[in-house]
Image (cartoon, helix red, strand yellow):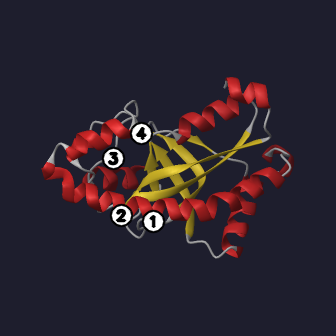
Amino acid sequence: AEILREKKPTTVLITGLCGGLDPSLGPGDLILAREVFQEDGVGLKPPEMTVTSARRALRKGKTRFVCSGLVTVEAPAATPGTKLELWNIHGAAGVDMETASFARVAMEQGVDWIALRAVIDPAAMSLPRTIHDWNGQESDLAIALRLARQPHNWLASGRLLISLRSALKSLRLGTPIVARVARDTVPLGDDLLA
């Protein structure tokens, strides 16, 4: 919130990785959020004009993506069963642990936002047991060390690393496209478009 007050951007791009809930999505598929649900079902929507412009730009760039909902949860959606339950409840294509919080802060500061996430773990993939209880507070190095010390997680960790490469490649392609849209879209407010 402090950075938003200081920098006064017109739009914030929220980008990063997510788990897949839609079974048709694979590692590296992008999700452009048309709505972000909190775990309690409350939805937050980015400006429709920005989402529409981003969809158009991603299609023009021949980028593989879906425009769908995201759901933000407090703990990793680590198993296919958990992901299926979230998909059935929210109808969202992906799940993460941050987007709703960032979007809420942006909205509180009067700043437009848009979110683009890349799937790292598809709906059918379980996360390594070691990170089922991850809360976002540990460093990447601490997680890597914990995974390395537990050989029974090596296969699942290897699959996750392969997926990470695809997800990061997609983000490198899609993020600049959506960033240009966020920069170039004049915030009118959806109330003026009605």
Q: Earlier in the sequence, mark 3 or mark 1?
A: 3
Residue type at the position of mark 2: Ile
Q: Residue at x 86, y 49 (%)?
A: 186
The spot of residue 107 in percent (x, y) is: 69, 34
Element type where label 1 sits in the image: helix
**Foreground tag (4 vs 2):** 2
Report how many numbered discs are placed on residues in the image: 4
For the residues labelled 3 and 4, the Cα–Cα distance comes to: 8 Å
Q: Which residue, given by chain and number where applicable, does mark 4 sit on?
A: 73
For the residues labelled 2 and 3, the Cα–Cα distance comes to: 19 Å
The part of the image, by quadrant, that contains residue 50 is bottom right
Q: Residues within 10 Å of mark 2 (few under 14, many from 20)?
A: few
The spot of residue 191 in percent (x, y) is: 81, 44
Element type where label 2 sits in the image: helix
Q: Residue at x 37, y 50 (%)?
A: 86
Name the disc covering residue 77, or none: 3
Q: Does the residue at mark 2 contact the one at mark 1 (Cβ under 8 Å)? A: yes
Q: Earlier in the sequence, mark 1 or mark 4?
A: 4
Residue situated in front as seen by the camera: 66 or 126: 126
**Foreground tag (1 vs 4):** 1
Q: Earlier in the sequence, mark 2 or mark 3?
A: 3
For the residues labelled 1 and 4, the Cα–Cα distance comes to: 23 Å
The part of the image, by quadrant, that contains residue 87 is bottom left
Q: Does the residue at mark 2 contact the one at mark 3 (Cβ under 8 Å)? A: no
Q: Does the residue at mark 3 contact the one at mark 4 (Cβ under 8 Å)? A: yes
For the residues labelled 3 and 1, the Cα–Cα distance comes to: 20 Å
Element type where label 3 sits in the image: loop
Residue type at the position of mark 4: Val
Q: Which residue, given by chain and number where applicable, does mark 1 sit on?
A: 166
The spot of residue 188 in percent (x, y) is: 86, 46
Q: Which residue, given by chain and number where applicable, does mark 2 sit on?
A: 162
Residue situated in front as seen by the camera: 140 or 95: 140
